[in-house]
Amino acid sequence: MIKAPEGSVALISGAGRGIGRHVALELLDQGWSVSLGMRQPVLPDWTSGREERVHLMAYDAADVTGELRWVDAVLSRFGRIDALVANAGIMIPKTVIEADDEDIDAMMAVNVKAPRRLAKAAWAALCATGRGRVIILASLSGKRVKSAGAGSYSLSKFAAVALAHAIRQTGFEQGVRATAVCPGFVATDMAAALTDRPADRLTQPEDLARIVAMLLALPNEASVAEFAVNCQLEEFF
């Protein structure tokens, strides 16, 4: 098991379920302190006995003031921020012709603008560690447009991948490393509504969580810009 530097603190958005929940649990198991960003914060049972390393925050990625409040609350509680895992996301399964401007705006707001604001709010703290880490949970839909119905979603996820690269470029000299994690179908509620493949044939969220933990633990000299993960054979992924 990879051990985090003592006292390391990670903020995880969308931590109430799915990928975010599993990332938080994995990091907690590996010794991290975690701040769980949830729309309705409730202390999960798996934090039992480790509550001193868990912080809850009411967080809605659509609230443009939420990131500053979250960062301030974490710094007040733990005094540092070592990593961000921007996991909160939405999908509206429409083609680029079917989608309205409101649909595109909603996905860009949650999938791109909110992670950018979170990185900006935590920037000084991330740089201060000399090894700040940012994970953007993008998607293979940020690498290719798999179908017409995924087209609008892909617009936002291509931008999310670009955001990870832009953060990496901006903070590299300060020791900040950013990675776009790009999974295909993951066994979550979102994927269940989009595929008829059985859940045991999809990438498991706990496996994705171990990948995120590994990326966070890599030294500055082993920077990974993108990490693609898939459950099925495709041309490149």
Image: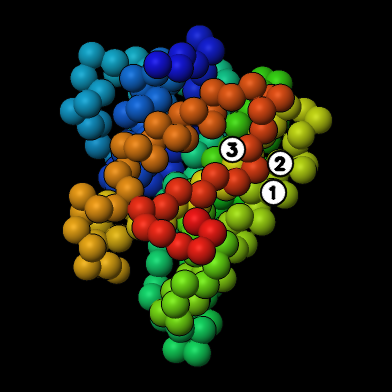
Left or right, 156 with reference to 2: right
The residue at which mark 3 appears reads as: 134
Q: Callout 2, which amino acid?
A: Arg
Q: Residue furthest top?
A: 6
Q: Residue at x 25, y 23 (%)?
A: 47
Quadrant in which residue 45 is drawn: top left
Dot 3 or dot 2, earlier in sequence: 3
Q: Given contact means CB atoms under 8 Å apart, are the residues at marks 3 and 2 in contact? A: yes
Label 1 to label 2, Cα distance in Å? 5 Å
Q: Looking at the picture, how far across and down is residue 203, in whole percent?
A: 33, 48
Q: Where 24 sits versus 141, above or below?
A: above
Residue 115 percent coordinates (x, y): 56, 49
| In the displayed structure image, the side of residue 208 where residue 84 appears, left or right | right
Q: Residue at x 49, y 16 (%)?
A: 4
Q: Is residue 65 above or below residue 173?
A: below
Which mark is on residue 165? 1
Q: Amino acid at mark 1?
A: His
Please say whether residue 208 is visible from this viewpoint.
yes
Is residue 70 in view from this perspective?
no
**In this view, 149 is above or below 112:** below
Residue ID for mark 2? 168
* SS type, badge 3: strand
Question: Could you say which is closer to the camera, residue 48 or residue 152?
Answer: 152
Q: Secondary structure at mark 1?
A: helix
Q: In the rendered view, does 104 fall on the left or right side of 208?
A: right
Q: Is disc 2 placed on a helix, strand or loop?
A: helix
Crowd around label 3: few <14 · some 14–19 · many ≥20 (10 Å)? many
